[in-house]
Amino acid sequence: MKRLVAIGAVALCTGCTATTRDIARASVVLSAQALAESMPLCRDAASLQEAQAGIKTARTCVEAYHIARPSIEAAASSVDAWDAGSRRNVVCAIGRAAVAVARALDAIAAAGGTVPLALRDAASLAEKIGGECK
Amino acid sequence: MMGEQIAIELIALAVRFGGDAIRAMIRRGADGDSSTCGEQVRKILDAHSTQSAVMQLGWMAGHGARDE
């Protein structure tokens, strides 16, 4: 309930702020959702291509998955064990995942598939968060 | 991260995204569910539709590797 209240506070009032951990958790879950939803789109796009092009798309997507998943899981672990270094760990891990997911989305588009705008926005926002990794 | 602007964009996107996981997360939060972030993430990523797609993509990618 605390999380919901914090999220609602940010959404409704610019003078209010959610805690950093709440926002980190939301960004991690959103990144996981973006990765999860991109894989069936990758599969569908690759399936419609001729053999070699489909293989290339499949490889790009599988590689993206194997980079993004451990990064998202690492970010989630940092949220669960929240301490002084967690914020940096989360933004850097989300950044790595975002780059990988963006690669998968580009592969879908290049294969002629449609990338839902919300999915593209999710990757873009995650990249923006990852840009804070220093 | 995690300036106010990014927070607002994040929440707006989460609302727009409409994914079951986001809705479930909000419901769980409202219900006081204490599942960890790691558990939530694994549940999303281990969904059948995702794992099935990853397996098929892996098969397609492996098929290409055998042809080389």
Image: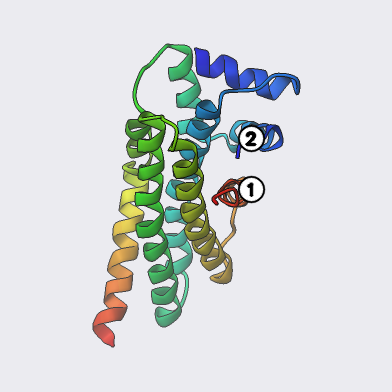
Q: In the rendered view of the protein, which quadrant contains the N terminus of chain B?
A: top right
Amino acid at pointer 2 = Arg
Which residue in the rendered view is the most extreme toward the right? A14
Query: Same chain for marks 2 and 1?
Result: no
* Towards the viewer: A60 or B10: B10
Q: Which mark is residue B55?
A: none
Label 2 sits on a secondary structure element that is: helix
Q: Please, is residue A29 above or below residue A14 in the view?
A: below
Q: Which residue is mark 2?
A: B16
**Can see residue A27?**
yes
Q: CA distance from mark 2 to mark 1?
A: 10 Å
Identify the residue at the far front of this view: A84
Badge 2, how many Cα within 10 Å: few under 14, some, many 20+? few
Q: Nearer the viewer, mark 2 or mark 1?
A: 1
Which residue is drawn at the image coordinates 62% and 45% (left, top)?
Answer: A118
Q: In x, y percent, where is residue A72? A: 41, 45
Q: Chain of mark 1?
A: A
Question: Circles 2 and 1: CB distance less than 8 Å?
Answer: yes
Q: Quadrant of residue A23?
A: top right
Say which mark, if any, is on residue A121: 1
- Disc 1 marks a residue whose amino acid type is Asp
- Identify whether B64 is placed above or below B45: below
Subunit that carries the residue with mark 2: B
Q: Is residue A33 visible?
A: no
Q: Secondary structure at mark 1?
A: helix
Expressed as whole percent of the image width and height from the top left, the position of residue A110 reads: 57, 71
In percent of the image, x 65 and y 22: which residue is there?
A17
Tell which of A41 and A5 is nearer to you.
A5
